[in-house]
Image: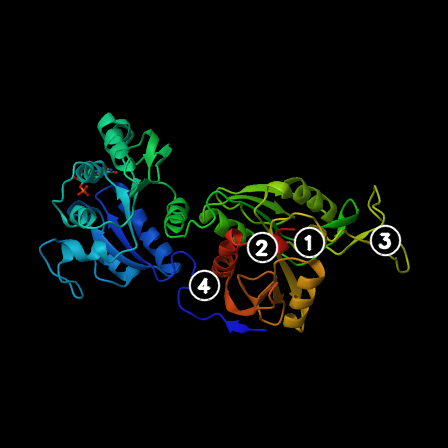
Amino acid sequence: MNDTQLSSPGATAAPLEDRRVLLGVCGGIAAYKSAELTRALVREGARVQVVMTEAATRLVQPLTFEVLSTRPVACDMWQTAPGTRIQHTDHGRQSDLIIIAPATANTIGRIAGGLADNLLTSLVMASRTPVLLAPAMNVEMWSNPLVQENLARLTNLARYHVVPPESGELACGVDGAGRLAPIDQIMDDARRLLSPQDLAGRFVLVTAGPTYEPFDPVRFVGNHSTGLMGYALAAAAQLRGARVVLISGPTALNPPRGVEVVSVTTAIEMRAEVMTRLAEADMLAMVAAVSDYRPTARATAKIHKTSGDKEIRLALNPDILAEVGSLETRPLTLGFAAETEDVVAAAHRKRAAKNVDFLFGNLVGGGRGGFACRKNSGVLVDRSGTQESFPLVDKAELAHALLDRLAPRLATRTPEEVT
Ligand SMILES: Cc1cc2nc3c(=O)[nH]c(=O)nc-3n(C[C@H](O)[C@H](O)[C@H](O)COP(=O)(O)O)c2cc1C
């Protein structure tokens, strides 16, 4: 049995962790919103180099971005900066992604026209780095055929991506399309562009959250699962190019962008939704904390308090993971098991008992992550008996680390694993 401790930098990284992002800010009224974007990028671990056009500096002080990115802002093509030999080429080539937000009609036109007459357009011209444009402008500008033609010209090239503006009240007082896309959406597109597309063309099924097993119309047997881990896994798989269906027990979470969510309440409902989709799935991640038991009876009216104790009789619920493991053909399957002690032995035992490809055992409670917190740690075991420990990291980061291990296995599944 091998035990590897996951520690290499980048191996577990969420898409923006330690990535170099060049954020171009143009002279649009939405330039102030890019301050929020800078914070969001930095919060996810990106190293952000802000480049402002001269027009942008008239609307927002570079100092704002300098403070938020903790780096000097580059504005002038004719000035050298520490760490760069030739500023108008180095910043672009040294980046993993260029985001231009807001992208003005002017800058879009200049890039599309092949011009390189300021620092930002020169940096774009002098690199092959993917560019994400987030246009923002007045509705007349946005609907101007020249702007649309310029954008179409750029998106015809694989390097350029657009996160379109949304409709709403614009700074000029009119309602219409042209408002900078929400920061969340720009972040999501940035994450996607920096994620490996190793699940492109794959269908991934994820279960998440608790199940509630009611015994009257207002009460149930349940658990503390919040769904965070399963939602993080679904979001990560979607970013990596998969079509994802998330079968979710009751949670308070927003559906991840681009993921189809099927809401269920009980284990029996969850089983039915998994089974109907299983034949098409390439990968199944059973992250839900499915209740092992359900009350044998469900009263149609609220059970009232009476003197003395009451007993609730419980029946065994279907074991969805074991059922998948017993099927003749099945997708690559990852199970999760929450344990309060001896997690490594339990993970090996459960993986073998349920005949699944991977099992992630995580300790819950005692500050070790798991239920109802943003972080998680644990051990991943597979069919070969290999085990890998994962330190306490953000669940989004852990989701990507797990997919780093699973995605390559899709292409190399042995007959024993498939059937
Ligand atoms: C107050 C103000 C707000 C502006 N807002 C926008 C805008 O939202 N979108 C846009 O494309 N241009 C806008 N402009 C026009 C640009 O600033 C102008 O086209 C400028 O040349 C853009 O330069 P740049 O692309 O190098 O940043 C605005 C101008 C002013 C004075």
Query: What is the spatial separation of the Cα atoms under label 1 and label 4, in whole angstroms?
Result: 27 Å
Which of discs 2 and 3 lies nearer the camera? The answer is 2
Q: Which of marks 2 and 4 is nearer the N terminus?
A: 4
* Residue name at image x 23 percent, y 39 percent: 104
- Pair 4/3: label in front: 4
Q: Is residue 71 above or below residue 118?
A: below
Amino acid carrying mark 3 in the image: Lys
- Residue type pointed to by label 2: Thr
Q: Alpha-carbon neighbours of circle 3 within 10 Å: few (<14), some, or many (≥20)?
A: few
Ligand 1 image position (quadrant): top left
Tell me the distance, in whole angstroms, between the alpha carbons under discs 2 and 4: 26 Å
Point out which mark residue 325 bears: 1
Instruction: Give amino acid for label 4.
Output: Thr
Q: Is residue 61 visible?
A: no
N-terminal of the pair, mark 1 or mark 3, is 3
**On the image, numbered disc 4 is attached to which residue?**
12
Q: Left of 231 or right of it: where is 140?
A: left
Q: Which residue is drawn at 32% across and 47% down?
A: 33
For the N terminus, the image quarter is bottom right
Q: How crowded is mark 1: few (under 14 residues within 10 Å), some or many (20 or more)?
A: many
Q: Nearer the viewer, residue 308 or 112?
A: 112
